[in-house]
Image (cartoon, rainbow, N blue to C red):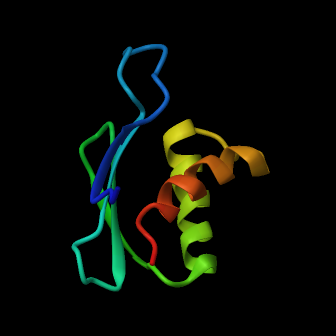
């Protein structure tokens, strides 16, 4: 099985009932990079290019995803949940 795209919704905002952020993770077959787009509730998008064969780059992106989608700086195990998800896109 090969995963090419995942879409995520972050933690729900108590006031609005909507996710605080969204993320799309994808990798085009044959590309050396994983593309991660993070969108906040205001509609602003930020695109990140992650080197698929660099564990440090993938872990750094996991830290960023965890903080943006969960709304707080997480524990190591919380970050590793995102890291394992990103590893599906690695080499």
Tell me residue 13's x, y (percent): 46, 22
How far across and how far down the image is residue 24, in percent?
Answer: 31, 52
Judged from this view, the residue extending furthest toward the right is 76
32 or 37: nearer the viewer: 32
Quadrant where the N terminus sits is bottom left
What is the quadrant of residue 51 in the picture? bottom left
Q: Residue at x 54, y 71 (%)?
A: 58
Q: Is residue 89 above or below residue 51?
A: above
Residue pictured at 59% horizontal, 58% vertical: 83
Q: In the rendered image, which quarter is residue 7 located in?
A: top left
60 sits left or right of 45 in the view: right
8 relative to 57 in the view: left or right? left
Q: Quadrant of the C terminus?
A: bottom left
Quarter residue 17 falls in: top left
At a point 41% along the width and 66% down the height, the residue shown is: 89
Q: Is residue 68 left or right of residue 28?
A: right
The relative height of residue 71 versus residue 76 in the rendered view (above or below) is above
- Against 33, residue 63 (above or below) is above
Image label count:
0
Q: 25 and 44: which one is in front?
A: 25
In the image, residue 10 sits, relative to residue 62, either above or below, namely: above
* Foreground pick, 78 / 11: 78
The x and y percentages for residue 67 are 59, 48
User: Which residue is drawn at the image coordinates 55% and 83% (left, top)?
Assistant: 54
Foreground of the two, 44 or 30: 30
């Amino acid at each position: 099985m090969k995963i090419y795209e995942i879409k995520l919704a972050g933690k729900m905002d108590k006031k609005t009932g909507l996710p605080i952020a969204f993320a799309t993770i994808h990798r085009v077959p044959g590309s050396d990079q994983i593309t991660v787009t993070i969108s906040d509730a205001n509609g602003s998008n930020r695109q990140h290019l992650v080197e698929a064969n660099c564990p440090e780059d993938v872990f750094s992106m996991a830290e960023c995803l965890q903080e943006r989608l969960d709304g707080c700086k997480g524990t190591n195990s919380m970050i590793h949940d995102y890291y394992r998800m990103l590893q599906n896109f690695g080499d």
